[in-house]
Amino acid sequence: MARALEQNKQDELDKLREEVLACTACQLHKTRTNVVFGEGSPDAKLMFIGEAPGYWEDQQGRPFVGSAGKVLDKLLASIGLSRSEVYIANVLKCRPPKNREPRPEEIKACTPFLDRQMAIIRPKMICTLGNYSTSYVLGKFGIKASSMSSVHGRVYRCSSLLLGEVLVIPTYHPATVLYKPYMMDTIKKDWEVIESVYKSL
């Protein structure tokens, strides 16, 4: 039964991926090399949501495979998890040129796909990585994230018809430590919270 349910989720994700591959809803489809749909277990209890693909993600069509991805892999390993046990996606599925920040019209065009990913996977827990994913996900539950410094490492118990009961834990984007190495201690503390909550599920 569990295996059949997981396969059904994978089938739904595969259909959604085909839609995303054909998407021309915003201007980013003109400059992308590859769509970065997301990857991981369709039955994941924990879902990570980042901001947007970077250069290497755009080249390979996979999330978090560049320098920030190496940091994410180390953080996952530090709490005893691998990519295959979680699901990793982004707010945007296409890379903004020169890694510029996502624009409001791009977020509006792309997040219906993210909503459907979340609805298919129905994670027990969502970890938002950085400002854009934190603002979007918490905003869905009527919570305003005024700044990362005010919300990171906190556990938000949320509920919606789309997702049911879900715990949301915001933390800084892994790329933060690439230009602010001193932030690693703060991020590690957030990940201790993530580990504790995950083990309690």
Image (tube, rainbow, N blue to C red):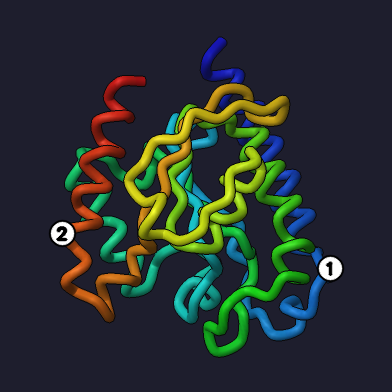
Give SS at disc 1. Answer: loop
Compared to residue 36, the image places residue 180 above or below, namely below
Q: Residue at x 52, y 15 (%)?
A: 2
- Location of residue 33 (image quadrant): bottom right
Q: Which residue is mark 1?
A: 25
| Horizontal side of residue 3 vs 163, given as left or right | left
Q: Which residue is mark 2?
A: 185
Compared to residue 94, the image places residue 122 above or below, namely above
Q: Position of residue 131 (x, y in %)?
A: 49, 63
Of callouts 1 and 2, the N-terminal one? 1
**Total marks drawn?**
2
Compared to residue 32, the image places residue 133 above or below, namely above
Query: Local crowd at mark 1 within 10 Å, few (<14), some, or many (≥20)?
Result: few
Q: Residue at x 46, y 50 (%)?
A: 128
> Is the C terminus in the top left, top right, bottom left or bottom right quadrant?
top left
- Location of residue 164 (image quadrant): top right
Amino acid type of disc 2? Asp
Q: Residue at x 54, y 35 (%)?
A: 42
Q: Position of residue 120 (x, y in %)?
A: 65, 33
Q: Nearer the viewer, mark 1 or mark 2?
A: 2
| Horizontal side of residue 91 vs 152, given as left or right | right
Q: Position of residue 61 (x, y in %)?
A: 55, 67
Q: Residue at x 56, y 84 (%)?
A: 100
Q: Position of residue 89 (x, y in %)?
A: 53, 53
Give SS at disc 2. Answer: helix
- Location of residue 108 (image quadrant): bottom right
Query: Local crowd at mark 2 within 10 Å, few (<14), some, or many (≥20)?
Result: few
Amino acid type of disc 1? Ala
> Is the N terminus in the top left, top right, bottom left or bottom right quadrant?
top right
**As drawn, which residue projects farthest toward the top?**
1
Compared to residue 20, the image places residue 52 above or below, namely below
Q: Nearer the viewer, residue 165 or 69?
A: 165
